[in-house]
Amino acid sequence: MIKFGRTMPVHAMLAILGLAATSVNALAADASENESVLDEIRQHCDGIAIWWTGHNGWLIKSDGLLLGTDLVLDDRGRESASPISAAELADELDISFITHGHGDHFNAPTSRVLAEKSKCLFVLPQNCLEKARDFGIPEDRIVVARPRQPIEVRGIKVDALRAIHGNRKGAVYWEANFDDCGYVFHLGGKSIMQPGDSVLLEDHLFVKHVDVLFISPTEHNMQIDDSITLINELEPKYIFPQHRDTYTVTPSNRFWTSAYTYDVQRRLSKDLQNRYHIVDMGRRFGIAP
Ligand SMILES: [Zn+2]
């Protein structure tokens, strides 16, 4: 089911947009690096390629369609700049998927730039609507996703997953809710799963056939054991750890900034270790047909 809202006049948020523009300039990485990622995206026209832009921010291009998940390209809080800025991406991006409203997933400066400079659709949970309006996203570019309900967006089928947010010590978050989402994208003959932020649920274990799995082995997500349980259950062809190595780790934030990336890897079977890829930001990764 696709939900399109009515058209809303674009807010005249000049002050905010001005701030966003400054932040783009301040955070833009080395120009040649930017060109290469952007060039790679533009040149890719056959099959599926992915690029990690930090945290849960993935760019996935299948044939001519480019989608992003939880892009935090222009976030000032990042330790290292994104390999591509929101302004650079704006013309290329078709769909921006958001899993939940936290700033390291539904990022204000990134989304404001994409709202202004891009024509991309935003697919997001119901509880993100207020933020979406605040970020200046026109209502006719918003598609609301509801957990356990399939949608079709710009020709691709997407299963919206339930996501229940965790917190310190692996406990379910005080503000956990039934609006947050994960997604399974069906494109180019492959299934690509972005669980968002969630503790392990049967919803994840029951997903049939996953080719590509993004996994978050952090204290506030699936930690080590549950990450391994999910990987063993789904046996994806490609496994990419995320929610890592993007924000400066401190004692008070390590439950979400730091992931048990290598602990999970070490405890997988040899076969699954070969499918587990700890990728560098901005490095193109081709998914075999
Ligand atoms: Zn998160």
Image (spheres, rainbow, N blue to C red):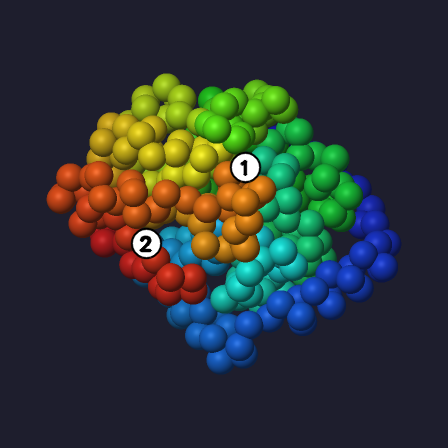
Mark found first going from the N terminus, 2 or 1: 1
Viewer-closest of 94 and 231: 231
Q: Secondary structure at mark 2?
A: loop
Which x, y percent locates residue 2? 56, 31
Q: Secondary structure at mark 1?
A: loop
Q: Is residue 84 left or right of residue 285?
A: right
> In the rendered image of this protein, does residue 25 appear above or below residue 200?
below
Which x, y percent locates residue 112? 70, 54
Viewer-closest of 80 and 251: 251
Q: Residue 99 has which mark?
A: 1
Q: Quadrant of residue 134?
A: top right
Question: Few, some or many C-alpha atoms within 10 Å of disc 2 (few <14, some 14-19, many ≥20)?
Answer: few
Q: CA distance from mark 2 to mark 1?
A: 22 Å
Q: Quadrant of residue 113?
A: bottom right
Q: Nearer the viewer, mark 2 or mark 1?
A: 2
Amino acid of disc 2: Ile
Find the residue positioned furthest to the front.
251
Amino acid of disc 1: Thr
Which x, y percent locates residue 21? 73, 66
The residue indicated by pointer 2 is 278
Viewer-closest of 222 and 66: 222
For the point 32% across and 24% down, the residue is 205
Which x, y percent locates residue 24? 66, 66
